[in-house]
Amino acid sequence: MAGQGSGGNVIAAICNIFFPGLGQLVQGRILAALIFAIVFFGGAALWFLVVPGVIAGIAYIWAIIDAAKYKGP
């Protein structure tokens, strides 16, 4: 797997912009993809409670950064 800043990581980060967790799935990290997707969509569904919405926003940004900085096994 290529290192941080590689083309694969950039594509994974862009995938996360459209669907949180998709970038991790592209990188082959299924568990991380599920966690990011569940936290984001669960928090977004409960946005009216404020705190889950904030957590969803943090998970969204974190998923993008995580995919961009992934170094591989």
Image (tube, grey):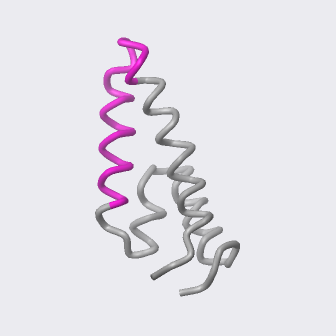
Q: Is residue 38 left or right of residue 8?
A: left
Q: Is residue 61 left or right of residue 23?
A: right
Q: Is residue 47 magenta?
A: yes
- Residue 56 in the image: state x and y as whole percent: 44, 33
Q: Residue furthest right?
A: 5
- Residue 28 in the image: state x and y as whole percent: 38, 75
**Residue at the location (50% across, 79% down)?**
72
Q: Is residue 62 above or below residue 55?
A: below
**Residue at the location (67% across, 77% down)?**
7
Q: Quadrant of residue 48?
A: top left
**Residue at the location (43% across, 14% down)?**
50
Q: Total marks drawn?
A: 0
Q: Is residue 54 left or right of residue 31?
A: right
Q: What quarter of the picture does the C terminus occupy?
A: bottom left
Q: Is residue 24 above or below residue 34?
A: below
> What range of the chain is rendered magenta?
32-52
Q: Quadrant of residue 44?
A: top left
Q: Residue furthest top?
A: 49
Q: Magenta stretch mostly in which secondary structure?
A: helix
Q: Is residue 59 above or below residue 13?
A: above
- Residue 19 in the image: state x and y as whole percent: 45, 51
Q: Is residue 33 above or below residue 28?
A: above
**72 and 64: which one is in front?**
72
Q: Residue furthest bottom?
A: 1
- Residue 2 in the image: state x and y as whole percent: 60, 85
**Residue at the location (63% across, 81% down)?**
3
Q: Is residue 8 magenta?
A: no
